[in-house]
Image: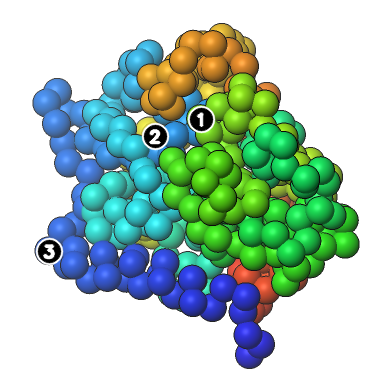
């Protein structure tokens, strides 16, 4: 077996999930029944625009319409969401495909029940501080780049884009920087460039920080990013709840598709944005719900090519059957 680029990072993520699963031996993580017979469901989201349909469904009563009593919680990182799903702290969570494929290669059994996000030009990217001598992707050679987590979708996609400029994975150094610190890490010199998303990306654009890489353009255009997942065991035991979740999510996604103003009006409630920032931030132009195995294979193939996986993981292995 060849050496993987992130051989130390991936087991750490998996270990967190496995420890959580071990510690939850007495906790089924089951969806209980609340007053009026509604099924209680705990959903973990990341503070990204693509989470808007969850909040729309909650605010518009769509979950209640389908017999669900939903609690929405904010996740701090992909690994924390994985751990919560494994421990029963959450039933369904927003997880990126890279995290789940990596976990599957080490025994984690998460399954996607729906799509959440597809890459859209202008939404995320690699930024530098104002006045930086870095002007292009080629200028990033030999530089330190901050990412939310090594072995993540951020450095995978950055690798894809950098290859267009002849810059290889070994030509840059990735530094793990928590999302809340991703913009300030530029000013304090911790990194030369940083992956910015969501609120941090909006603030950087407002402040005039140069965007060196548009994450979801070029070779990463339309790249699948994340979906809604749960453990295989929980999903198999709660098929009816999953069906209700998908129905409510689909209705909310249709509302988001028809009314971008509804989406932008929802963002300040969970992304810590001002109304002005919410009005200018990039939001999805499409809101897919059904899983797309062909698109997911693109992620697995890229991970294998760039050394994130030793061999491809088939989408069917991480999809609800």
Label located before the other in sequence (2 or 3): 3
| Alpha carbon distance from label 2 to label 3 | 25 Å
Q: Is residue 199 left or right of residue 131?
A: left
- Rendered image quadrant of residue 247: top left
Q: Are marks 2 and 3 in contact (CB under 8 Å)?
A: no
Q: Say the numbered circle drawn on residue 77.
A: none
Q: Is residue 180 visible?
A: yes
Nearest to the observer: residue 86 or residue 162:
162
User: Is 201 situated above or below 212?
Assistant: above
Badge 1, how many Cα within 10 Å: few under 14, some, many 20+?
many
Q: Looking at the image, which residue is at 29% across and 21% down?
A: 64
| Alpha carbon distance from label 1 to label 3 | 38 Å
Please provide percent x and percent y for residue 146. 58, 53
Q: Looking at the image, which residue is at 19% across and 57% down?
A: 28
Helix, strand or loop under label 1: helix
Query: Would you name the residue on which mark 2 appears?
Result: 245
Q: Nearer the viewer, mark 1 or mark 3?
A: 1
Q: Looking at the image, which residue is at 40% across and 57% down?
A: 79
Q: Looking at the image, which residue is at 59% across and 53% down?
A: 191
Q: Say the numbered circle drawn on residue 199.
A: 1
Q: Say the numbered circle drawn on residue 26.
A: 3
Badge 3, how many Cα within 10 Å: few under 14, some, many 20+?
few
């Amino acid at each position: 077996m060849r050496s993987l680029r992130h051989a130390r990072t991936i087991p750490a993520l998996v270990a967190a999930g496995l420890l959580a699963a071990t510690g939850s031996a007495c906790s089924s993580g089951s969806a209980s029944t609340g007053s009026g017979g509604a099924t209680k469901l705990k959903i973990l989201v990341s503070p990204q625009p693509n989470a808007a349909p969850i909040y729309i469904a909650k605010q518009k009563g769509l979950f209640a319409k389908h017999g669900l009593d939903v609690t929405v919680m904010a996740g701090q990182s992909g690994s924390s969401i994985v751990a919560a799903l494994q421990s029963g702290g959450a039933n369904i969570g927003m997880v990126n495909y890279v995290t789940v494929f990596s976990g599957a290669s080490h025994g984690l059994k998460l399954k996607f029940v729906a799509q959440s996000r597809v890459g859209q030009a202008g939404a995320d990217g690699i930024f530098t501080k104002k006045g930086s001598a870095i002007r292009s992707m080629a200028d990033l050679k030999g530089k330190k780049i901050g990412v939310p987590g090594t072995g993540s979708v951020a450095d995978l996609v950055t690798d894809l884009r950098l290859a267009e400029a002849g810059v290889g994975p070994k030509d840059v150094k990735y530094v793990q920087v928590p999302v809340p610190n991703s913009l300030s890490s530029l000013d304090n010199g911790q990194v030369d460039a940083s992956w910015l998303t969501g609120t941090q990306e909006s603030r950087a654009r407002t402040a005039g920080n140069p965007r060196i890489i548009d994450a979801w353009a070029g070779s990463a255009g339309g790249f699948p990013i994340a979906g809604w997942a749960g453990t295989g065991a929980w999903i198999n035991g709660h098929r009816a709840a999953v069906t209700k979740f998908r129905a409510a999510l689909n209705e909310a996604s249709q509302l988001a598709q028809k009314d971008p103003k509804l989406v932008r009006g929802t963002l300040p409630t969970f992304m810590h944005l001002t109304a002005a920032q919410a009005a200018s931030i990039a939001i999805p132009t499409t809101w897919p719900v059904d899983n797309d195995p062909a698109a997911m294979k693109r992620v697995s193939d890229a991970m294998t090519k760039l050394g994130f996986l030793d061999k491809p993981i088939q989408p069917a292995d991480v999809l609800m059957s």
